[in-house]
Image (cartoon, rainbow, N blue to C red):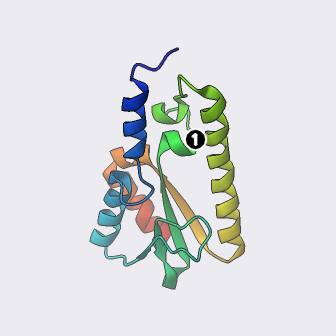
Amino acid sequence: MVDKLTKEHRSENMRRIHSKGMKPELLVRKLAHKLGYRFRLHRPDLPGRPDLVFPGRRKIIFVHGCFWHGHDDPNCIDGRRKPKSNLEYWLPKLARNKERDAANEAALIGQGWAVLTIWECDLRKTNLLAEKLKSFLN
């Protein structure tokens, strides 16, 4: 299938996507703070530059976009979605993202950190997300 956007418009959309400070991450940060947890952001000395780091608890949270990080949940629409154009570029790129995420998580666990990944689709149920955060961080 052919992309519905022009090459220039698609390029502009992609340029606006950043790795830090996006809405899903901000929602998790706000919720964690509201629950009374304090954290550090994007520590460059840790594999994968985790989104939230709780140094005293030795716990880390990654907030992943379902499409970009290949969420495997069959109920997740964005995780199942595949690019429609330039497949020879996108499919290997998305596969590398998943491999890198797994390697970063393994490295962090090897260093004694507990790791939680929160998926973008998890943000739809704030009450369940709050319970998940409390359970992980206590």
Occupied quadrant, residue 12: top left
- Give the answer, above or below, for where 89 lies relative to 108: above
- Give the answer, above or below, for where 45 lies relative to 29: below
Q: Residue at x 41, y 60 (%)?
A: 20
Q: Residue furthest top?
A: 1
Q: Residue at x 70, y 68 (%)?
A: 107
Three-letter amino acid code at the position of disc 1: Gly
Q: Nearer the viewer, residue 111 or 135?
A: 111
Place of residue 125 in the rendered image (x, y in percent of width and height, measured from the top left): 34, 47
Place of residue 46 in the rendered image (x, y in percent of width and height, measured from the top left): 59, 74
Q: Nearer the viewer, residue 112 or 64?
A: 64
Q: Residue at x 51, y 29 (%)?
A: 81
Q: Nearer the viewer, residue 12 or 81?
A: 12
Label 1: few (<14), some (14–19) or many (≥20) C-alpha neighbours in 10 Å: many
Q: Residue at x 50, y 82 (%)?
A: 55
Q: Nearer the viewer, residue 77 or 134?
A: 77
Q: Is residue 72 left or right of residue 30?
A: right
Which residue is identified by label 1? Answer: 70
Q: Is residue 101 left or right of residue 67?
A: right
